[in-house]
Amino acid sequence: MSRIPRIAPAALTDDQRSLYESITAGPRARNPFGIVDPDGTLAGPFNAMLLNPPVGDALQRLGAALRHGGELSDRARELAILMVAASRESGYEQFAHEHVGRQLGLTDYEITALREGREPELVDPEEQAIVATTRRLVDNGKLTDEDYADAVSKLGAAKLFELSTVVGYYQLIAMQLHVFGVEGPQ
């Protein structure tokens, strides 16, 4: 049960309405799963963003940039997100991104392995590097010099920057989901 009430669209302040429209009409609108409930209220982490529209807007714009403007492949990004969700026991994140991952071709084997905290066997070398690097980041919060050199050699510095941002962003979202009591369907 969420610790904060859902804010009905008719009850939004002007700042909240502007944020609501940015979230629901932005790039996420192409895949609206899990963003808006049938009654029009925002779901998941998005409802909490309405509590502080300036910060919520900056956060949702970062999330949109990571999901829709980065260099990581969609599959690679979802592998990392699902690893974060499992490591943080984030039910909503797990539920939502398993759905997205399936749309992007993640197999049941891959999704189950990630949910159980295991690294799935992957054919794509970049995806392997994403999973190995994400594991180090979620387990240790940092990379050794050797791990850094390995990640840069396989991903390049720009993709490593993006990956570390994805991991940090989804750890933040997982924390907020826990703080505000937002869980996935039971």
Image (cartoon, rainbow, N blue to C red):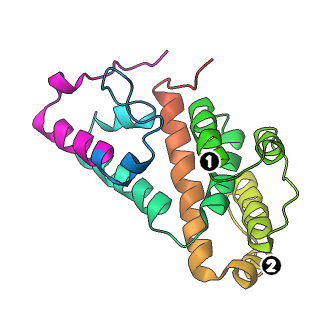
Residue 40 in the image: x percent, y percent? 30, 26
Residue 129 occupies quadrant: bottom right
Query: Residue sitting at 63 percent across and 53 percent down?
Result: 104
* The residue positioned farthest toward the right in the image shown: 121
* Residue 8 against residue 33 in the figure, above or below: above
Q: Earlier in the sequence, mark 2 or mark 1?
A: 1
107 in magenta? no
The numbered dot on residue 58 is: none
Residue 133 occupies quadrant: bottom right
Q: Secondary structure at mark 2?
A: helix
Q: Secondary structure at mark 1?
A: helix
**Camera-side residue: 5 or 128?**
128
Query: Residue sitting at 60 percent across and 56 percent down?
Result: 167
Compute the Cα span from label 2 to label 1.
35 Å
Does 114 sit left or right of 180 as displayed? right
The numbered dot on residue 146 is: 2
14 in magenta? yes
Residue 47 in the image: x percent, y percent? 35, 31
**Camera-side residue: 140 or 186?**
186
Residue 82 in the image: x percent, y percent? 67, 46
Amino acid on which disc 1 is placed: Gln
The residue carrying mark 1 is: 103
* Residue 166 against residue 110 in the figure, above or below: below
Residue 91 in the image: x percent, y percent? 62, 30
Location of the C terminus (image quadrant):
top right
Task: Please report contact status of discs 2 and 1: CB closer than 8 Å, yes or no.
Answer: no
Query: Residue sitting at 58 percent across and 38 percent down?
Result: 93
Residue stretch rendered in magenta on the structure: 1-24
